[in-house]
Image: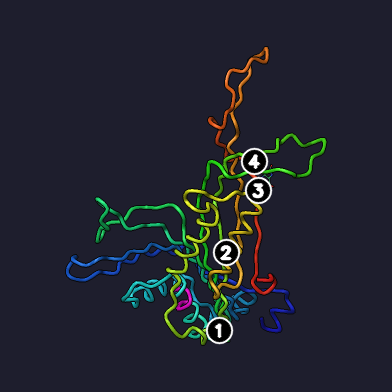
Amino acid sequence: MTTLARDLGLEIIYGKRLVRRGNEWDGGGGGGGTDSFAEWSLDISLFSDCLSAYVNGDNSDIVATDTMKNTVYVKAKECVEAISMEEFAIELGRHFTSFYKQVTAATIKIVEKPWERLYVDGQPHKHGFKLGSERHTTEVMVKKSGAVCVTSGIEGLALLKTTKSGFEGFIRDNYTALPETRERMLATEVSASWRYSFGHLSSIVKRLHFNETYQNVKKVLVSTFFGSPHRGVYSPSVQYTLYDMARAVLKRFPDIESIHLRMPNIHFLPVNIRSKDNHSIVEFKDDVYLPTDEPHGTIEASLSRFRSRM
Ligand SMILES: O=c1[nH]c(=O)c2[nH]c(=O)[nH]c2[nH]1
């Protein structure tokens, strides 16, 4: 921030939201190879020394938001091979902060539309995709100094298990109606974001495998939530399971510094129906539930490698 901007209490950020790009990377061979495809929605924010535009109406230090949008397509065109969202965001941040003297930092957020390769009769289709569910996200900040902060994430990872979950021993008072149980359904929609430990563009020397790490983090989250296929794992609360999942990710991936998890507790209510004279019409026997979205519990936490004793 310039001195004048500080005196005015003004912090300047501007950018372009929801820039959408679809990219096909040809597998070669005139349609004979295996094509890749990605559809992304980008938000660009620039921290910039363009005070005069705000204070005097002088636009000479403004990078037009239309130019930001065009930059996305020019940089996309330059990517002749499939690239991860994280690497693309780093490249955009590097461009904005090094090309324009006014731009001190850039934040790029990207959400991927979950197109997945289609399988026909168990065979991966060379150029066919279908829409999946959970979304890969990233947020990258690049500063003019070369400092970089990369987070990746997942949204909408819906998980449900029919047993091996309970909730007991919580505070009971005059307002508590919830029965204790060692047998309930557990359903959630996980949102996770994790921060990588490298902090400077110069430390990014080799091609980074963000897509592979994304897939592997997802696997660790899912397998920790469910446990082994036959025995599963007992969850005494969403809180305990969330912490277990966060710990498993930090343990498995040394280049992840911290992780934030949000796991709503999506309730499936046991159905019990009684007549006016208290005769049971439907009695719940771990079978029929009323699925609900609202209200739901929200359980979240962040775990950081340096503050934990891992
Ligand atoms: O796993 C749970 N954690 C809670 O904090 C909570 N609160 C509640 O009503 N049910 C549950 N379940």
The amino acid on which the numbered mark 3 sits, given as a three-letter code, is Pro
Q: Which mark is residue 236?
A: 3
Q: Which is more toward the observer, 179 or 45?
A: 179
The residue pinned by badge 1 equals 200
Which residue is located at x 55 percent, y 84 percent?
A: 200
At label 1, which amino acid type do we have? Answer: His
Query: Pointers 1 and 2 in contact (CB under 8 A)?
Result: no
- Going from N to C along the chain, the mark reached first, 2 or 4, is 4
Residue 73, compared with residue 277, is above or below; it is below
Res 67 → quadrant: bottom left
Numbered tag placed on residue 182 in the rendering = 4
Of labels 4 and 1, earlier in sequence is: 4
Of pointers 1 and 2, the one earlier in the residue sequence: 1
Q: Position of residue 271 (x, y in %)?
A: 59, 28
Give coordinates of residue 70: x percent, y percent.
Answer: 40, 72
Gap in angstroms between the C-alphas marked 1 and 3: 41 Å
176 with respect to 134 (left or right)? right
Distance, label 3 to label 4, CA atoms, is: 8 Å
| Among the two numbered marks 1 and 3 on one chain, the one whose residue lies closer to the N terminus | 1
Asked which secondary structure carries label 1, the reply is loop
Q: Nearer the viewer, residue 149 or 225?
A: 225
Say if 62 sits above or below 160 in the image. Answer: below
Residue at 71%, 36% (x, y): give it.
178
- Residue behind mark 2: 248
Q: Amino acid at mark 2?
A: Ala
Which contiguous range is marked in magenta?
A: 88-92
Q: Nearer the viewer, residue 67 or 266?
A: 266
Q: Residues under labels 1 and 2: Cα distance? A: 26 Å
Residue at position x 62%, y 18% from top? Answer: 280
Residue 164: say if magenta. Answer: no
Q: CA distance from mark 2 to mark 4?
A: 24 Å
